[in-house]
Image (cartoon, rainbow, N blue to C red):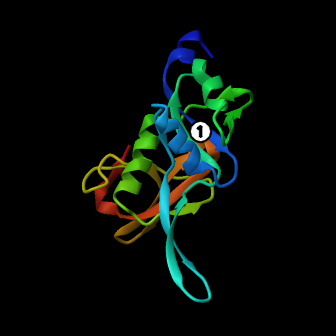
Amino acid sequence: MDKKSVFLEQWYVLYTKAKHEKFVENELLKRKIEAFTPKVNLRRRWSDRVKYIEEPLFKSYCFAKFSLENKRNILSRTGVVNIVRFNNQYIPVEDSIINSLKLLVKNKVRLDPCPYFKVGNRVEIKKGPLKGLIGYIEEKRNKNTTLVVTVDAILSSVRCIIDIACVDLA
């Protein structure tokens, strides 16, 4: 890692204590640190009622934008366990991935967490409300296709169904 990248603000994945994703996001936002935890509304059924609850899309993970020179400040926050890394290297998440996740959440597209997936063509949606979203084609059925947005840093993905006519190779 070069010295310039230590001072560059980038998105990183924070591993949090169980059920602390939203808490960590709020704590970072209070301290003027850009943070994002993608959340979905899930239907939960109990014996006496059905209720919709907001759940993090990726359990025990929160995204935060900061420079590595400030990593001690991040790691000292309540609920943060560590910054995700591989082979002792902190792995930044591309802005396009964060923007794609934000766009999916904002447009209330039905999202299902799915296994890590990196096979198929990388595509970008060229028209419609999801314009600019980048992902991989998982499955193609007549007019619809299953698009997967992958977050390499945490080996996780989300999938949604889109119209194939809106997609071009990225």
Compared to residue 24, the image places residue 105 above or below, namely below
What residue is shown at x 59% (from left), y 61% (from top)? 114
Q: Nearer the viewer, residue 75 or 133?
A: 75
Q: Is residue 98 left or right of residue 27?
A: left
Expressed as whole percent of the image width and height from the top left, the position of residue 57 reads 54, 57
Q: Is residue 126 visible?
A: yes
Q: Amino acid at mark 1?
A: Val
Q: Quadrant of residue 70?
A: top right
Residue at 27% from the left image edge and 56% from the top image edge: 129
The image quarter in which residue 56 lies: bottom right
Placement of the C terminus among the 4 image quadrants? top left
Looking at the picture, tell me which residue is in the foreground, 22 or 155: 22
Residue 32 in the image: above or below residue 44 = above
Residue occupying the point 53% across, 12% down = 4
Which residue is the site of mark 1? 13
The reply, left or right, for residue 138 in relation to residue 86 is left
